[in-house]
Image: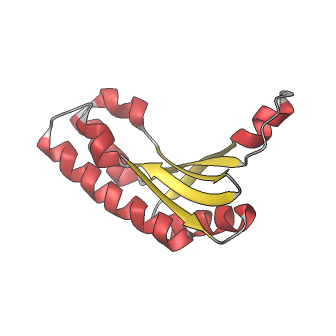
Amino acid sequence: MYYIVATDKSFDQASADLESAVKNHGYGVLHVHDLGGTLRSKGLAFDNECKIFEVCNPSQAAKVLSIDMRLNMALPCRISVFTEQGKVKIGLIKPAQMLSTLSQDKALAEVAKEVEEKTVQIVDEAK
């Protein structure tokens, strides 16, 4: 269900490289959530870093929504850069598996497979 890779890059370098990889593959970054920074700003002791990148390919999103509008709640795709036990990792929840739990539509499965292949490529390029 998860695709996670470790990288020898710093957290900041992996984050920058992920943003570049997203654009290189025809996707856009809609927003970046600095989850680690947000938790620390609320006074919580949180030692790890975590940025969640909301990424989208408009034509793929439009296909998904034309099949089942309820799936707007599963969009956009999220790719995270995070630290865990001192290691920097980049990961995502695989779209094909996730969406298969929400819909059995064969056309949706094909779109999700295409998105999954592309987002895995993005993660691999960023690592």
Residue at 62% in and 46% down: 31
Q: Is residue 105 or residue 87 the one in the foreground?
A: 87
Q: Is residue 82 above or below residue 8?
A: above
Q: Is residue 73 above or below residue 8?
A: above
Hey, which quadrant is residue 113 in on the image? bottom left
The coloring applied to the image is secondary structure
Q: Quadrant of the N terminus?
A: top left
Q: Is residue 85 or residue 57 the one in the foreground?
A: 85
Q: Is residue 77 left or right of residue 21?
A: left
Q: Position of residue 10 (x, y in %)?
A: 72, 67
Residue at 32% in and 62% down: 117
Hey, which quadrant is residue 41 in on the image? top right
Q: Is residue 81 or residue 17 the one in the foreground?
A: 81
Q: How many marks?
A: 0
Q: Position of residue 15 (x, y in %)?
A: 66, 61
Q: Is residue 40 left or right of residue 96?
A: right
Q: Is residue 19 left or right of residue 55?
A: right
Residue at 46% in and 42% down: 76
Q: Is residue 1 left or right of residue 27?
A: left
Residue at 19% in and 52% down: 110
Q: Is residue 42 or residue 61 the one in the foreground?
A: 42
Q: Position of residue 95 (x, y in %)?
A: 34, 47
Give the residue at the far left of this rendering: 106
Q: Position of residue 8 (x, y in %)?
A: 65, 72
Q: Quadrant of the C terminus?
A: bottom right
